Image (cartoon, grey):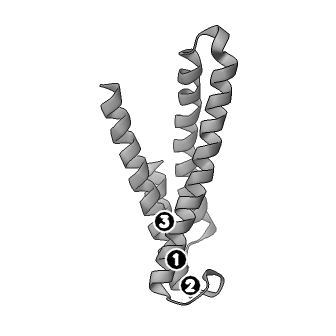
Amino acid sequence: MIGGCLAISTLNAQTTEQDYILRYFIFGTGLGLFRSPNDSTVMGSVPRERLGIASGLLSLSRTLGVNVGVCVIGTVFGGLIANLAPGTDVAVAPPEAVVAGFAGSYRFAALILCGSAVMTAIVKT
C-alpha cells in the first residue's frame, strides 16, 4: 500500500489510463493482501462467544478509519491547493495546484502507512 501511494503520488496531467490503472492496481493489491489476513487474524483471536461483538467492532473501526481518513486527506489536499493557489476555490484551481495537492495527499498517506507499519512492528515485539 505504501508503494501504491507513492506510485499514485507521481501521477500528473499527462498520465495515461494505463499508468493510472497500474498505480491503483499496486495500491489495491496491497490493500487486498493486508485486509483479509488482518480481519482473519482479529476474528481468529476472539473467543467464539464474542465473535458477534468482535465483528461489529471490526466493522466500526473500519468505518471510522475510512471516515476520518477521508476528512484528514481531504483537508491536506485542500490545504496544499490553498498554499499553491491562495484565494482560489479548489473547483477552479489551476491544474498544477490540483496535481500538487493530489501528489502531496498521497505522500502524506504513505507517511501515515509507514508510521502504522512501524508502530505495528514495535507492538508485536
Where does the C terminus fall, quadrant-wise?
top left
- Helix, strand or loop at label 3? It is helix
- Helix, strand or loop at label 2? It is helix
Tag 3 residue: 105
Up the image or down, 8 lies above or below 125; here it is below
Foreground of the two, 94 or 18: 94
Q: Quadrant of residue 36?
A: top right
Of tags 2 and 3, the one toward the viewer is 3
Question: Real-space Cα distance between discs 1 and 2?
Answer: 6 Å
**Percent coordinates x, y for residue 32 in the rendering:** 58, 39
Tag 1 residue: 99
Look at the image and tell me whether residue 12 can be seen: no
| Residue extending furthest toward the top | 48
Of tags 3 and 1, the one toward the viewer is 3
**Mark 1 touches mark 2? (CB < 8 Å):** yes
**Percent coordinates x, y for residue 117 in the rendering:** 38, 40
Q: Which mark is residue 22?
A: none
- Helix, strand or loop at label 1? It is helix
The residue depicted at 47 percent of the width and 69 percent of the height is 103
The residue depicted at 35 percent of the width and 38 percent of the height is 119
Residue 14 shown left or right of residue 118 in the figure: right
Look at the image and tell me whether residue 86 can be seen: yes
**Mark closest to the chain's N terminus, 2 or 3:** 2
Tag 2 residue: 95
Question: Real-space Cα distance between discs 2 and 3?
Answer: 15 Å
The residue depicted at 51 percent of the width and 84 percent of the height is 96
- The number of discs equals 3
The amino acid type of the residue labelled 3 equals: Ser
